[in-house]
Amino acid sequence: MLFLSAKSPIMLNRPAKNDLPAHHPTIPTDGLRRGSIALLTVFVAVMVFAFAAFTVDVGLIVLVKQQLQTASDAASLAAAQELVTPLQLGAASGSPAETAAVASARSAAVAVAAENPNGYSATTALYPNSDIQFGNRTWDFGTNSWVTTWNVGPYNTVRTKARRVSSNGDSLTLLFAPVFGHQSTDVNEESVASLIPGVGFSSGGGGHIPVLPFAVDVDSWMALTGATTPDNWSWNEATGAATAGSDGVPELSIFPLHPDETLPAGNRGTINIGNPNNSTADLSRQISNGVNSGDLAYHGGSIDFSGGPIVFSGDPGLSAAIKDELESIIGEPRALVLFTEVSGNGANAAYTCVRFAGVRVMHVKLTGPMSLKRVIIQPAAIFDSHVIAGPTDTTVLGTLYTMPKLTQ
């Protein structure tokens, strides 16, 4: 019998770790760690793949948007160029000339867009009726801002839309997104190009500027706008010839004055653009070729009526010495200045000028009896890279326009 006393402690013998039987359970820490890493690796791989797929598809979308924008820009500029002819002819909105220009503009836009690839497509397709729109861009003097009115002529603005959309059956197919159930996406880009009305000319870029050294009073020019002047001459754009007969665009004889006109002597003559002591040789050069940067240097490098009237010195009448030069430019668009008043007489004449107006010379006769002398002009819009864009009234015939520019 075993007797325990208070002084005898109970001793419990525990087996050492190495003495545990082989079947004793232990926690498999190394295996658990390996399993966790495997699961984490799978998760990270999925996330990396998803991110890579997202990045590739986003890159594709950005690339296609840039390519569609380029195609749209080029198409709108090409279409706007086709609108020059009816504006230059002074053709009314809805006229056969404008209708023909719109058809040409649609064709040009479609053809130019087709030269531009996007994504994995070798061409960009424009739908002529739904992707191309025409309008009129003009200055609103009430709000002091440019306003574009769509589907209203005379057309000087074009909007094109380059699209990869499901409604046309050609949305952009994505590369990796289909794995996640997203097959394609719509991509849209648009551009607006305009022939912007202008207020003057700058010598920037060098070359010749299509300005005639002539002045015409505003009242006579406004009579043209109201179609209260004769229409006895016709300009044929195809043949490049001016012939007797009506073409729907009125004319004005800028020399000589009619007996019932009351403007003081010295009006409707030549003005000095550039050197105030212009010679006949200077006038002949400016009529034949236009003014140059040297001429505009006398005016600070530009003639810009947005700042208000400009006074030019001038001379009365037209000399027969410039007959040949005037005849050589028949039909070619040129700009002359409009004045509100003239002071002084003869070589001391001073013209207060307020704007440019585009014209083409239709008929010249500076020899023989005074009663038979004539210089007859017809309104014609001007399109030139030297034109300074600015607020002007486009309802007055003979507007200046820039060459096509992107406005959106």
Image (tube, helix red, strand yellow):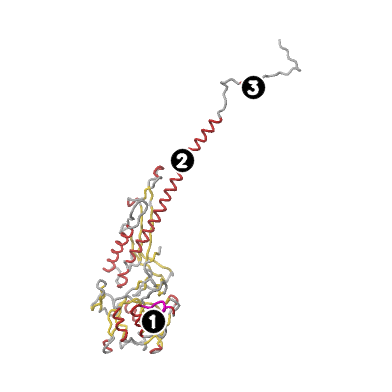
**Inter-mark Cα distance, 2 to 1:** 77 Å
C-beta proximity under 8 Å, tags 2 and 3: no
Which residue corresponds to mark 1? 339
Secondary-structure class at tag 3: loop
Q: Quadrant of residue 302?
A: bottom left
The C terminus lies in quadrant = bottom left
Range drawn in magenta: 290-296
Question: How dense is the environment of label 2, judged by Cα within 10 Å: few (below 14), some, or many (20 and up)?
Answer: few
Residue tagged 2: 46
Q: CA distance from mark 2 to mark 3?
A: 47 Å
Indicate the quadrant where residue 306 lies: bottom left
Query: Which residue is painted at 46% across and 40% down in the image?
Result: 46
Q: Earlier in the sequence, mark 1 or mark 3?
A: 3
The amino acid pointed to by label 3 is Ala
Give the percent coordinates (x, y) of residue 114.
Answer: 32, 57
x 49%, y 38%: residue:
41
